[in-house]
Amino acid sequence: MRDGLPDAVIVTEQIESGATRRLTFDTGSIAAWDSALVSFLLKVLVECGRRDIEADQSGFPDGVRRLITLATAVPEAETRPGEGHGSLIARLGVRVIRLAADAKAMVTFTGEVGIAMVRLARGKARFRRSDFTLTIQECGAQALGIVSLIGFLIGLILGFIGATQLQKFGAEIYVANLVGIGMAREMAAVMTAIIMAGRTGAAFAAQLGTMTVNEEIDALKSLAISPMEFLVLPRMMALALMMPLLCLYAIVLGALGGALVASMLGISLTIYFQQLIDSVTVTDVAVGVVKASVFGVIVAFAGCLRGMQCGRSAASVGAATTSAVVTSIVLVICSDAAINVILTVLGI
């Protein structure tokens, strides 16, 4: 006995041991009860149901009877087999259907963004300028700290990697070329995009996902306000404007990181920066800035897309945030590869 109740296991064993056909309950001496009694009786009733034993509930207190009726009114959710339990063809079909649905949603979202851009060009887009300014601050000034750290460390890493190889040929001075061109054309834009995907893209997805859960987006639609113009457009413009500036800032910090390596190699900082200026051209910087602009649009696009696709539960917000980060990084890497191929073909 625990708290006046017998052990449910003992009662179950007694039911199994005899040829019981009907079970009655005498609760007349109970003066007070709590949820422990309800839990105990539910376990006994479940065992009776499994063995086709009639259970007379007329002896239950009224409150207990109502709670048990409420608890048994909703059937237990059935656990459905996951994708891994079906056949190979079934799993492949599910994946294809899901990819087709995602592709359709992405194309639809792209079209809606395009319509919003056209309305912006015509001066008819409806969004608050204060939201746009606040988003610029969140995407730009508040991201300087993490961009500074990563940009400096990436330049430092490139310098160390180059130095270990260039020292074999006595060409340590070309560390400036490696760091400068690498940061300007590639690493500054890519690393800044990855940082913003994990920081800002995830924030966009969480914000819009929470608004979806709270039915705020539905409220905007009921007021004839386009969520694409009011919510998505300012976020995409803000990140597209801030990414080139953050990329330029990362290039400078990367060059400073390479300067630290050069000083450790005994290279004069004057010679290092002169070599850096001679090796890095305006074209190299322009390539990085263009890449950063494209990556900014991609990160904002993925974050807003997953946020608008969020379900109606709190768990969906977390899933949308994770999906936004993964989608952003994958699209950034794929687009970077495509841009590099195009630049190679064009000889830039």
Image (tube, helix red, strand yellow):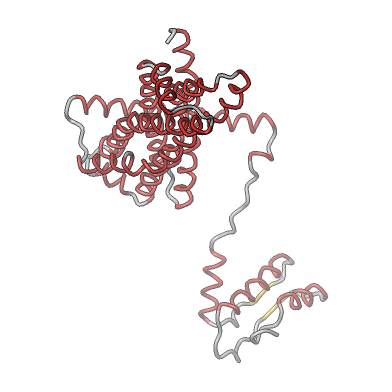
Estimate the x, y position of residue 7 in percent, counting from the top left.
Answer: 71, 79
Residue situated in front as seen by the camera: 224 or 331: 331
> What residue is at 42 percent from the left and 33 percent from the top?
256
Q: Quadrant of residue 151?
A: top left
Residue situated in front as seen by the camera: 131 or 11: 131
| Residue 177 appears anywhere in the view | yes
Residue situated in front as seen by the camera: 219 or 290: 290
Estimate the x, y position of residue 236 in percent, counting from the top left.
Answer: 32, 33
Estimate the x, y position of residue 264 in percent, counting from the top left.
Answer: 52, 33
Residue that extends furthest to the right in the rendered view of this protein: 17
> What residue is at 45 percent from the left and 40 percent from the top?
198
| Residue 328 appears anywhere in the view | no
106, above or below 307, in the image: above
> What residue is at 47 percent from the left and 30 percent from the top?
258
Residue situated in front as seen by the camera: 211 or 300: 300
Quadrant location of the N terminus? Answer: bottom right
Quadrant location of the C terminus? Answer: top left
